[in-house]
Image (cartoon, rainbow, N blue to C red):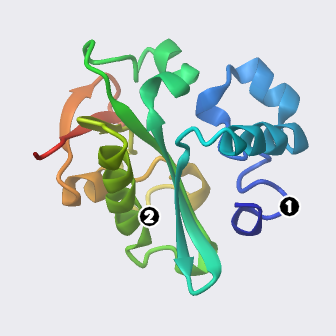
């Protein structure tokens, strides 16, 4: 992950901790402290996500874990739980710049779904941008686009904001 995210931690020292921490704590530990926090999570073997490789080189990432691992989702007015069903959440994507717009996000999402199913998930949620590709800078599309989730079989189950649908995929037995 360090090779993929680079010395700055992907986006502004996030190290994929945005959804896991309240805003003040995230701001306080941005950068190196977030890197160490993610390193600690990975070391515990708690499900955190999937990496995509091209040969030996990491080129993409999708964070996916049980929703309760993402405390920011529980506090979000827009992304609050739809119901009381246990779900896994695909919260974040990072694709190296030279591999963007190549279909890698869709492949990462499919791998994240398989990973979640393998770990017992019956429902996987995503919180993508409802806007179209090209309508925002890549750095702000870290949750993916609704069209990618639709292509992977997800359906919109809630929309509390014009630009942020809650999308779900039910496990097929």
> Under tag 2, what secondary structure?
loop
User: Is residue 35 in view from this perspective?
Assistant: yes
- Mark nearest the camera among 2 and 1 is 1
Badge 2 vs badge 1, beta-carbon distance below 8 Å: no
Tell me which numbered mark, 2 or 1, is placed earlier along the sequence: 1
Q: Nearer the viewer, residue 117 or 72?
A: 117
Relative image position of residue 8 (x, y in whole percent):
83, 56
Residue 80: name its quadrant.
top left
Q: CA distance from mark 2 to mark 1?
A: 27 Å
Relative image position of residue 106 (x, y in whole percent):
35, 65
On the image, numbered disc 2 is attached to which residue? 134
Q: Residues within 10 Å of mark 1 (few under 14, many from 20)?
A: few
> Under tag 1, what secondary structure?
loop
Q: Residues within 10 Å of mark 2 (few under 14, many from 20)?
A: few
Q: Quadrant of the N terminus?
A: bottom right
On the image, numbered disc 1 is attached to which residue? 7
Tell me what residue is drawn at x 27 percent, y 56 percent. Answer: 147
Q: Is residue 105 left or right of residue 6?
A: left
């Amino acid at each position: 992950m360090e090779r993929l995210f680079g010395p700055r931690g992907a986006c502004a020292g996030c190290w994929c901790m945005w959804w896991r921490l309240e805003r003040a704590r995230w701001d306080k530990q941005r950068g190196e402290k977030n890197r160490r926090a993610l390193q600690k999570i990975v070391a515990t073997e708690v499900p955190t996500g999937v990496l995509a490789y091209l040969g030996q080189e990491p080129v993409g990432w999708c964070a996916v874990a049980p929703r309760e691992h993402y405390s920011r989702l529980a506090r979000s007015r827009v992304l609050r739980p739809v119901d009381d069903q246990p779900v896994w959440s695909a919260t974040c994507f990072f694709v190296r710049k030279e591999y963007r717009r190549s279909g890698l996000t869709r492949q990462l999402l499919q791998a994240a779904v398989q990973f979640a199913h393998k770990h017992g998930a019956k429902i996987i949620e995503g919180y993508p941008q409802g806007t179209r590709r090209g309508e925002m800078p890549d750095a702000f599309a870290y949750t993916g686009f609704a069209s990618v989730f639709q292509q992977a079989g997800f359906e919109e189950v809630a929309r509390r904001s014009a630009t942020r649908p809650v999308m779900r995929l039910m496990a097929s037995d």
